[in-house]
Amino acid sequence: MKNTYKIEVDCANCANLMENTARKVNGVASAVVNFMAQKMTVEFEDGADPKTVIRDVLKACKKVEPDCEIEF
């Protein structure tokens, strides 16, 4: 399953760091952050609960960019 989320990220470098961080979260098969569009596309592993995984992604991303937001 793949979902796209609206995000708030301040710079392209932070977006790249968030993308790399999101890819390491359990339940994420792939993640792509588009800084210009302010969107994150996450593909979830089979059997993963998207709501739980995206909350974990947000927690991980806040370690990189404390003021980032993901609308889900």
Image (cartoon, rainbow, N blue to C red):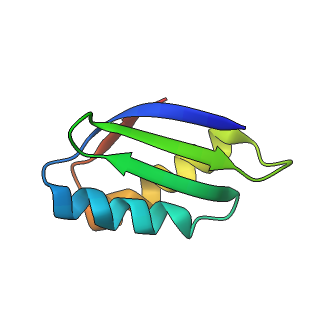
Where in the figure is residue 54, as x and y percent of width and height? 56, 45
Quarter occupied by the N terminus: top right
Task: Locate residue 19: give its quadrant.
Answer: bottom left
The residue lying furthest to the right in this view is: 47
- Residue at 86% x, 48% y: name it: 47
In this view, the residue in front, 36 or 49, is: 36
Where in the figure is residue 25, as x and y percent of width and height? 59, 65
Task: Locate residue 62: give its quadrant.
Answer: bottom left
Q: Is residue 3 left or right of residue 39?
A: right
Q: Is residue 55 left or right of residue 48?
A: left
- Residue at 27% x, 36% y: name it: 38
The residue lying furthest to the left in this view is: 11
In this view, the residue in front, 54 or 35, is: 35
Where in the figure is residue 32, as x and y percent of width and height? 45, 51
- Residue at 22% x, 61% y: name it: 14
Looking at the rendered structure, the number of numbered marks drawn on it comes to 0
Q: Is residue 10 above or below residue 6?
A: below
Q: Is residue 53 left or right of residue 31?
A: right
Q: Is residue 40 above or below residue 71?
A: below
Task: Locate residue 2: give its quadrant.
Answer: top right
- Residue at 56% x, 45% y: name it: 42
Q: Is residue 59 left or right of residue 25?
A: left
